[in-house]
Image: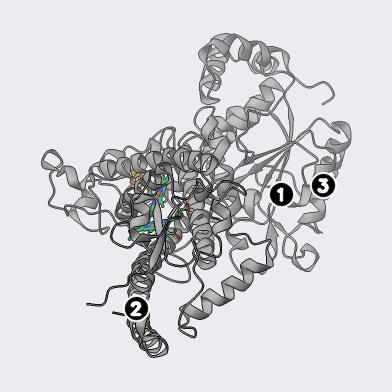
Amino acid sequence: MIMHEEPRKVYYLFSPFLRIFHWTMVICISFLFTTGLLITKPASGGVSMEPTFGNILLSLDLIRNIHFIAAFIFVAAFILRIYGFVINKGDRLFPRVWKAEFWQSMIEVSMHYMLLKPSHRPYLRNPLARMSYVGLYSMVFIEIFTGFAMYLMVNPNGFGAKFFGWTIGIFGSEFMIHLIHHYIAWAIMLFVIGHVYMAIRADFMEREGEISSMFSGVKILEHEPVDVGEIMDKESSDTFSDRKPLHAGQQETKM
Amino acid sequence: MDKLETMWDVCLRKNIKRRSFLKSCAALTSIMGLNMDMLSKVVAAAEKNPLPVVIWLHGHECTGCDESFLRSATPLTSDLVLNSIALEYSHALSAAAGEPFEEHLHQTMQQYAGKYILAVEGAVATAENGIYCMTGGKPFVSVLKEVAKNAAVIIEYGACATSGGIQAAKPNPTGSVSVREIVGNSKPIVKVPGCPPIPEVMTGVVMHYALFGKLPPLDNEGRPKQFYGNRIHDTCYRRPFFDTGMFAENFDDAGSKAGWCLYKLGCRGPVTYNSCGNLRWWNGLSYPIQSGHGCIGCSNDHFWDEDPFYKRLPEYGPILGDVDKIGAAAVGLTTAGVALHGAMSVVQKKKRQAAEEKSDGKKVE
Ligand code: HEM
Ligand code: HEM
Ligand code: SF4
């Protein structure tokens, strides 16, 4: 087996808040998606069913409540994401679309993913990934707005309906809202496939601790990443750990 | 008819007993969705306020709203038309016709300028200068504009008036639009959608104005809150079946006979706001779902373009078809694509390593 023995550096990126949020999101979306599909096409016991002996698992009420509970937890978890964003630079790796450099890197990385270039420059998070997360968050917001619009319009005169009800106007009708909500649900699934693949692939191709980064908060890179400036203060360098070279396999991680 | 009578005056003139008068007031109070504490106010208003002048126009429509209106039980339509409003002009209910009738319309408009209620049933055909709908020899669109100019309030009765009606279904050859689109927001407009609206809702809205001199509280779409403040689905007596997961799968199966939820048969209850679930029709006799037919969402704007009615979310998407099948296919394709990309990446990585080994062999042990 071939072992690389190059010096590698540990970069602390993700605050625990971001990481907890990420995995909460994964769990919530799994529940939301499965229960969502069951809301569209409810399982049913068929016409021989007896009300008294109805199976609780066939209960659409239960399915819907799971959907709503997952939705509430998901939305509540955003507070963690926001807190992380405030306290930690590594949680702020969003696209810097106002910089020409960003777009150049984007082309470079795209070339690599189109298999036209053997490798791309090292990044803490590459521009394509950054854009994909903006896409995901946008879709999630559409789901939240359309979802709460449907949910809260139980009482169209209530406070909640004032807050979210206008979403229905944007898409024309509540009928369309149900469809949009459902289309976006599938679009999110497509993101997930691409995302999980990219995480595994990055892990395999660069061996930079990609997947584990969402657990430990750190990535381990061989070369100094192009976007390292984003997590460093100008003077001090205490946001990323020791500048001492470390060996793969014996790195220290830091929370 | 210079000084207008009040409801009480009418009762006196017609020898209707005080007791009956009070009973009608009580019935009105409840049908308007008001608290019974309001009864004394309703009685006072019925004694003091002159009957409101109503001009009722019919545009591009089937007159089904009239059919519904005629069947109002509380208040009785006859009561309303003869004793509670001064209905000066109506295409469908007037005995008069021709020139004198049109003349009467103009007199009414002048005499009560700024005071009359304009009730409109039917859409406004706009294509080809409105020639698809003519009344009294003129395009309806010009009649409407003329009458609307001096109206105090406008009531849009029925889906045609509120969003163009069946004739506005794609591709809408007659260019039918709602009344609001012609009149704009210059006048207070109340939207009473439905195809047709529930009779008691029609009478309730006009009575509210008759008694209190103002429109009932409206929601953000301009519909009276007390009648359009609930989803059918949230007031449906079949909801327990929905919650338990008991669905009719076909109109001839045992579930359908047993009165189970019609969700899978395309019921639009979950997206429709109306009073069918609590007021019901024909004096509380029944409503579509109780009769075994799913709601078609007739009080929704453009419900006619959301067909077919017997499919839920027209089988999950209008043009594309079942989004779950498309989604599953897309997921399959993406997975395959990703797997292929993965394989090619591995090959590429091997090549890259080989190249690196060649260029400086000492990196690899
Ligand atoms: C429902 C499924 C998932 C969704 C919606 C999702 C979404 C996201 C989002 C939005 C981010 C960016 C975090 C931020 O900066 O705000 C992210 C990062 C990340 N996710 Fe996921 N994720 C999902 C599943 C997974 C799974 C299953 C894995 C593990 C294989 C994973 C691994 C990662 C990693 C490693 C990162 C950091 C990547 C980077 O630094 O660019 N995710 N994910
Ligand atoms: C990523 C997040 C979400 C996914 C993937 C998702 C998925 C789905 C799907 C596929 C449906 C079925 C659509 C239909 O046939 O009507 C649905 C329905 C629904 N979802 Fe979501 N959803 C998400 C988030 C939310 C949120 C945040 C809420 C807010 C409360 C919400 C509330 C609802 C409601 C009210 C329905 C309609 C239930 C009904 O008609 O009985 N969803 N969801
Ligand atoms: S019949 Fe229609 S309105 Fe009634 S519970 Fe079922 S889906 Fe809802």
Tag 2: amino acid: Gly
Residue toward you, A61 or B67: A61
Tag 3: amino acid: Glu
- The tag earlier along the polypeptide, 3 or 1, is 3
Q: Is residue B158 visible?
A: yes
Q: Are marks 2 and 3 on the same chain?
A: yes
How far from the left and from the top, in percent, is residue B63? 60, 51
Vertical order, A120 against A84 (above or below):
below
User: For the residue carrying disc 3, how many other residues have a C-alpha within 10 Å: few (<14), some (14-19), or many (20+)?
Assistant: some
Tag 1: amino acid: Val
How far from the left and from the top, in percent, is residue A144? 47, 47
- The residue that label 1 is drawn on is B179
Asked if labels 1 and 3 touch by Cβ distance under 8 angstroms, the answer is: no
Ligand 3 lies under 8 Å from the Cβ of mark 1: no
Residue toward you, A198 or B264: A198
Secondary structure category for the residue under label 1: helix
The numbered disc on residue B342 is: 2
- The tag earlier along the polypeptide, 2 or 3, is 3
Say which of marks 2 and 1 sits in front.
Answer: 2
Q: Quadrant of residue B70?
A: top right
Chain designation of label 1: B
- The tag earlier along the polypeptide, 2 or 1, is 1
Say which of marks 2 and 3 sits in front.
Answer: 2
Q: Is residue B322 visible?
A: no
How far from the left and from the top, in percent, is residue A242? 44, 51
Residue drawn at x 83%, y 40% is B104
Chain designation of label 3: B
| Spatial separation of the CA atoms under disc 3 and disc 1 | 21 Å
* Displayed-image quarter of ligand 1: bottom left
- The residue that label 3 is drawn on is B102
